[in-house]
Amino acid sequence: MIKTYFYKDIEAEQLQKLIDRNTDPNHAIQDTVLQIIEEVKTSGDEALKSYAKQFDKVDLEKLYLDASDIEELAMTISRDQMRALEIAFQNIHKFHQSQMKRERVVETMPGVKCWREVRPIEKVGLYIPGGSAVLPSTLLMLGIPARIAGCKEIVVCSPPQNNGKINGFVAYCLKLLRIDRIYLVGGAQAVAAMAYGTESIPKVNKIFGPGNQFVTKAKSMIQGMTDVSIDMPAGPSEVLVIADELANPAFVAADLLAQAEHGSDSQSILVCLSEEFAKAVEKEVDVQLQVLPRRAMAEEAMNNSYIIVAENLEEAMKFSNLYAPEHLILETEEWKPLVNKVLNAGSVFLGNLTPESAGDYASGTNHTLPTSGYARSYSGVSVDSFVKKITFQHISEEGLQHIGSTVEILAELEGLQAHKNAVSIRMK
Ligand SMILES: NC(=O)c1ccc[n+]([C@@H]2O[C@H](COP(=O)([O-])OP(=O)(O)OC[C@H]3O[C@@H](n4cnc5c(N)ncnc54)[C@H](O)[C@@H]3O)[C@@H](O)[C@H]2O)c1
Ligand SMILES: N[C@H](CO)Cc1c[nH]c[nH+]1
Ligand SMILES: [Zn+2]
């Protein structure tokens, strides 16, 4: 039984509890992660090998695979699988390439020209999840914008599989991206390794990628402890589905379960317009759960999820904006008037025939998205995440005459004489 609430009856305190994703209430994850970060900082590769043994159950002699291993593994997948990865690659590339727009030079006053130039972040670290499921699609979602941006060094980390290697799909994506090394390191230790550098793993400038609670906590922590930045907190997955009375309960159930199968800490929320519809979806969830290979995990995630019955689509949108989901699916053919009402969401899927799975893999948008309410302030990964935009300006003699006195007055009113002089000395 999925818990069901009527929006009109929810009190403020309860509403806050429903919206909160307090994933580490006793700081147990934070304590573990801090210990791992310290260990990697002091013992480097040795610590990484020992964590591989502890968490991934493998003895690693070498912490990486190179081009020849990657080539060999990539050849183990079928032609159809290669083709599907290539189509996903092309669509993601097409969508992300369109994000590279040159900005124009702006003349704010005659002779005063300002503009921005784009420069890639030189060294980036990509984390590819590989605990409960290996996600080669994440490698495409991060590697493609990194390549388009022109990042010089791309460091990839992913947990080793139980044969001490990676799977063929990840290997094939590495080949598509022309990346010829992958580090066999997962969890918080991978984040720490890319933040501090070890004997084998280079330190990077920015770390990207989704992961479980250990990975996400490590990313947030290293951002405060080092000069390395992160894309965003992209932790356990979430979906919020808004469905009207004409939506198909089987489609809705399928979308809720697609997110639930990511992990027992995933959250799948349904906001619908009647108790009858809620019951129909619950029934479908039970039916579809029976045949899921990852049933136990999905079932646990559904226990951690809930249904809200709203009076109308306006009210449903109000709740969604408060929750700020990573993914929002609008399962109504009346989605057009709702688009402007979406204020907080990572990525939005419109209509009854647009499943989140399409965006997870192949439509072109990025699936690395903010979770836990961070969609209120962060965007998902894009080419912008891999570049810096540096401002430039040039002032001519005419420009100095136009802007000079304004700067002198402003410097004087702030009591900064040297600032004023730097202008006055040029105007003489
Ligand atoms: N928000 C997004 O954009 C997005 C995209 C894709 C996936 N995801 C999420 O990524 C997550 C992937 O998680 P995963 O677990 O499958 O893979 P993962 O690669 O994130 O984590 C696996 C690693 O976690 C570490 N670990 C496991 N148990 C630990 C423990 N008790 N103590 C310390 N470290 C431990 C181990 O090092 C292991 O190698 C899922 O929650 C999924 O929902 C999010
Ligand atoms: N739904 C995940 C983002 O939260 C992305 C993904 C990868 N593979 C399947 N799904
Ligand atoms: Zn998914």
Image (tube, grey):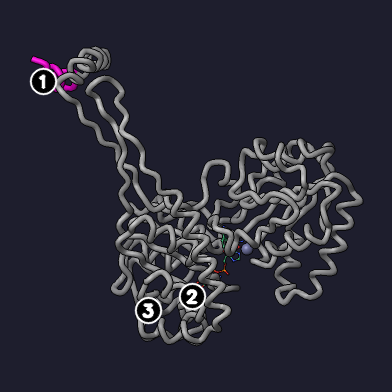
Q: Is 172 displayed left or right of 392 in the figure?
A: right
Q: Position of residue 236 (x, y in %)?
A: 60, 59
Mark closest to the chain's N terminus, 1 or 2: 2
Say which amino acid is labelled 2: Val
Magenta residues, as a range? 417-428
In magenta stretch: residue 401: no
Q: Earlier in the sequence, mark 3 or mark 2?
A: 3
The amino acid type, in three-letter code, at marker 3 is Tyr
- Residue in front for this viewpoint, 184 or 355: 355
| Residue annotated with mark 2 | 170
Kindly report which numbered mark, 3 or 1, lies closer to the viewer in this rendering: 1
The circle drawn on residue 182 is none
* CA distance for labels 3 and 2: 14 Å
Sooner in the amino-acid sequence: mark 3 or mark 1: 3
Q: Residues within 10 Å of mark 3 (few under 14, many from 20)?
A: many
- Residue identifier under label 3: 64
- Label 3 with label 1: CB-CB less than 8 Å: no
Q: Is residue 210 above or below residue 5?
A: below
Q: What amino acid does circle 1 point to? A: Arg
Q: Nearer the viewer, residue 356 or 197?
A: 356
At mark 2, the secondary structure is: helix
Q: Residues within 10 Å of mark 2 (few under 14, many from 20)?
A: many
- In terms of secondary structure, where does tag 1 sit? helix
Residue 49 lies left or right of residue 380; in this view the side is: left
Q: Position of residue 93 (x, y in %)?
A: 47, 60
